[in-house]
Amino acid sequence: MSTTPGADKKIVAGILGILLGALGIHKFYLGYTKEGVIMLLVSVLTLGFGGFVMGVIGLIEGILYLTKPDEEFVATYVTGKKGWF
């Protein structure tokens, strides 16, 4: 188990990004409401056509989340609040 506070979000956010990235669920989970709404609206308002692009972004972000060390993930996405990539 990780001892870095906030690192527990890494695996869940990574899996959500890979599986439900087009809907921005991983963004909502990490507390990025504005970015999550943008991804959700692009997917819905384009009747799914923009969902492919958002899905690719979610896949990339999910992989990035899972491959970063715990300390770097927390510093970048939990503490630093970096919204995109």
Image: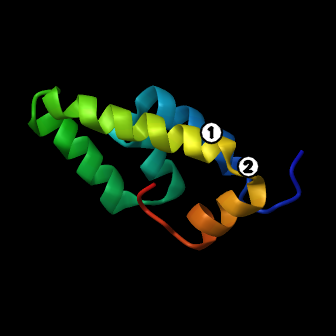
The x and y percentages for residue 10 are: 66, 47
Q: Is residue 22 visible?
A: no
Which residue is painted at 60% across and 46% down in the image? 65
Residue 66 % position (x, y): 65, 41
Location of the C terminus (image quadrant): bottom left
Going by the numbered disc 2, the residue's amino acid type is Asp
| Residue 4 left/right relative to 47 | right
Please give the residue where the numbered disc 1 appears in the rendered image: 12
The color scheme shown is rainbow
Going 66% across and 68% down the picture, which residue do you hit?
A: 75
The answer to whether residue 63 is above or below residue 39 is above
Q: Which residue is mark 2?
A: 8
List the single residue furthest toward the bottom.
80
The answer to whether any part of residue 62 appears in the image is yes
Q: Mark 1 Cα within 10 Å, few/some/many (few <14, many 20+)?
A: some
Q: Quadrant of the N terminus?
A: top right
